[in-house]
Image (cartoon, grey):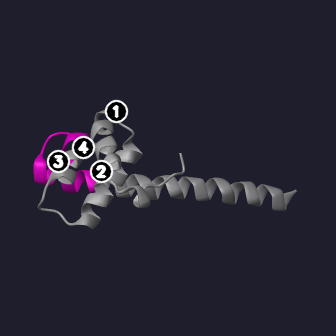
Amino acid sequence: MILAGLMVFAFFALVAFSFFVIHKSVRSNCIKAKNEFGGDCIDSLIALVKSEKFKTREKNSAIWALGQLADKRALPLLYELEQSLPEQEKCHYY
């Protein structure tokens, strides 16, 4: 019984830690974009993705953050990016 309780605790601790790490990463991306472009997080992340000033890794982080935030204002950009991928590079998990 104690082992089962420890396993449940470990599971919830892992979930809580995962949420913390994701939140921290999204917040870091938002702060970086807001410092560069101003405005709210979504608009500044969209501007970062569209900017020629940033490297692919930084743009990918901003795209990931937009997905985590799940704001519908990001959908047109995300759809446009998805449509611009060559067929062999698309993820077909949906």
- Reading the chain from its start, which is encountered first: label 4 or label 1? 4
Q: Inspect the magenta stretch and tell me whether residue 85 lies in it.
A: no
Marks 3/2: CA–CA distance: 18 Å
Q: Is residue 81 left or right of residue 50?
A: right
Q: Is residue 70 left or right of residue 13?
A: left
Marks 2/1: CA–CA distance: 19 Å
| Residue to which mark 1 is pinned | 72
Give the amino acid type for the residue marked by disc 3 in the picture. Ala
Q: Secondary structure at mark 4?
A: helix
Q: Secondary structure at mark 2?
A: helix
Q: Residue at x 39, y 46 (%)?
A: 67
Badge nearest the viewer, 2 or 4: 2
Badge nearest the viewer, 4 or 1: 1
| Residue to which mark 2 is pinned | 84
- In the picture as drawn, the residue positioned furthest to the top comes out as 72
Q: Residue at x 83, y 62 (%)?
A: 3
Badge 4 crowding class, 10 Å Cα cut-off, few under 14, some 14 to 19, many 20 or more, is many
Q: Residue at x 34, y 33 (%)?
A: 72
Residue 86, position in %: x, y?
A: 35, 57
- Reading the chain from its start, which is encountered first: label 4 or label 3? 4
| Residue to which mark 3 is pinned | 47
**Image position of 79 with respect to 11: above or below:** above
Residue 37, position in %: x, y?
A: 11, 48
| Residue to which mark 4 is pinned | 41
Q: Which residues are magenta?
A: 29-44
Give the amino acid type for the residue marked by disc 4 in the picture. Cys
Q: Is residue 8 left or right of residue 86?
A: right
Marks 3/1: CA–CA distance: 15 Å
Give the amino acid type for the residue marked by disc 2 in the picture. Ser
In this view, the residue in front, 60 or 17, is 60
- Reading the chain from its start, which is encountered first: label 3 or label 1? 3
